[in-house]
Image (cartoon, coloured by chain):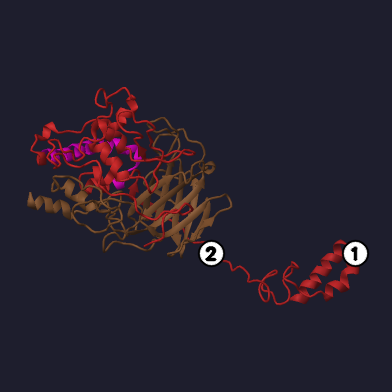
Chain colours: A brown, B red
Amino acid sequence: MGLGAIAIVAVVLVAADHIDAPGSMGTSADIADFYAFEPTVGSDNTVFAVDLQSNVLPDLAYGTFEENVLTEINIDTDDDLVEDLVIQAIPRDGKMYFFGPVAPSTTGTTGAVMVSSPLGSVAISGATATVETTANGVSLFAGPRQDAFFFDFFQFNAVIGGMAPGGFKPAGDPNSTADDDTTGVDTFDGANTMSIVIEIPNSLLGETSAVNVLGLPVYKTWVTTNSKQ
Amino acid sequence: MKTHTIKYAFALCALLIFASCSDDDDQMMAATPTCTDGLMNGGETGVDCGASCSPCETAVNPPDFSGMYAQVDFIGRPGINTVLSADGSTKDMHNMAIPSEMAAAFQAVFEARLEQYHDVYAGLLGADPMAVNFEPNILGDILNGPDNDGFTNNPVSATVLTTVLAADVLEVAPNLPTTYFNGGSGAPNYEGAIGLTGRTPQDDVIDVSLILLFGGGDGARFSGQDTDMDGISDLPRLTSDGVAFTSTISTTFPYLGAPE
């Protein structure tokens, strides 16, 4: 299995979405990760955090939001898996401009910036976070952040390549970065990513009739990056 | 300019309310221009701005956001495309897809990939690949309730699981605590099990995914067991990657830690 295994390992496969596919791998539009959560118990807000790009491996695009890349958070509120609302983010001249939440002019894989529904803008941060809060209580951020993702991705490649009869390694000291070959190593420890974070009152997103498999009301959400045509 | 403005103001004033204007006339002519008098005077370059006042806002053309944008990358739940798409072309197709069409497009290839992973370990264990297959997981156990053993009539078959996962969206529940998945007290009762209400940076989404893919009805099917008690694992460890959250996280916006 020598050659086959080598070929599999040569294909860099990184979860959660980091560097996941040949078409977008390592580009400035490469989505690394996506989080959606209630910031504190009892909060009436929802936080969306989108990570683009990564410096987890050498030679990847990292460090600059491209002006021809539109990042879109899609929100389905009626359970048909079609976006009812979008929140858009796109940079211009050192600022990240946000639009929405608003019904998009068209659903699907192409669309336009919803310029008639501006939400606000924030200066793109350096190492220190600059945040803006709009009059309607929406917080905005864009800039480099730690990549919070954790995964032993080299061992994952060995596992799916059929080269790890024992599977994953047992847990060791979570703060150890030394690969001593006996415990799991977080490949993403020390990696950074370009984050876009928005905290928005649920009242601006409205009610949802979508439910999860446990029957709880949920927004069904996903993120796309889109390149100017 | 100043003279002209005052003349105009005077003329207007006189026209409208002649009597009272005459009283104010001297005072008005003698008034020192200020930055709050509502007039462009005292060398100002706009009304109450410029010169010794605060700078006038220059008219800036709004940024140009025109044009059409086309999808190049996609993410819903973490790791779905990475783990369940078998090759580069499938991954590219998934990134160009929309959720409402994903189940039809990707369920079958995801299910095949899931079985392929089991075949890898069948080979390593010296077992017949046809005999080592996905087993319905703890989601079915939780849905069936505590009286079920996790294996009997478990509804979460490979087809059911990959149908759910193929429609790749991240569910987030407004006004509920966020947990990607938490099995609570674990098998067999799963006391306090909750999940599918979103994803925080701290959620161990990889271990959750591994448990749902390889954990079987009790969540621990392939977890490095030493079945013959010789001190050596006889089954592969596939239900945890052995790493935990270590990044900096803040309790305040934007939550994610400063770059390293």
Tell me if residue A11 is in the magenta stretch.
Answer: no
Label 2 to label 1: alpha-carbon separation: 44 Å
Tag 1 subunit: B
**Which one is nearer the viewer's eye here, A114 or B160?**
B160
Relative to B185, B9 lies left or right: right
Number of numbered labels in the structure image: 2
Q: Position of residue B75 (x, y in %)?
A: 34, 47
Q: Which residues are the magenta region?
A: B94-122
Q: Quadrant of residue B157?
A: top left
Give the residue at mark 2: B61
Give the residue at mark 1: B20
Q: Amino acid at mark 2?
A: Asn
Q: Amino acid at mark 1?
A: Ser
Tell me if residue B109 is in the magenta stretch.
Answer: yes
Query: What residue is at 26 percent from the left and 60 percent from the top?
Result: A57
Q: Position of residue B153 (x, y in %)?
A: 26, 22
Could you tell which of marks 2 and 1 lies nearer the N-terminus?
1
Q: Quadrant of residue B237?
A: top left
Q: Secondary structure at mark 1?
A: helix
Query: What residue is at 51 percent from the left and 43 percent from the top?
Result: A43
Tag 2 subunit: B
Q: Position of residue A199 (x, y in %)?
A: 49, 49
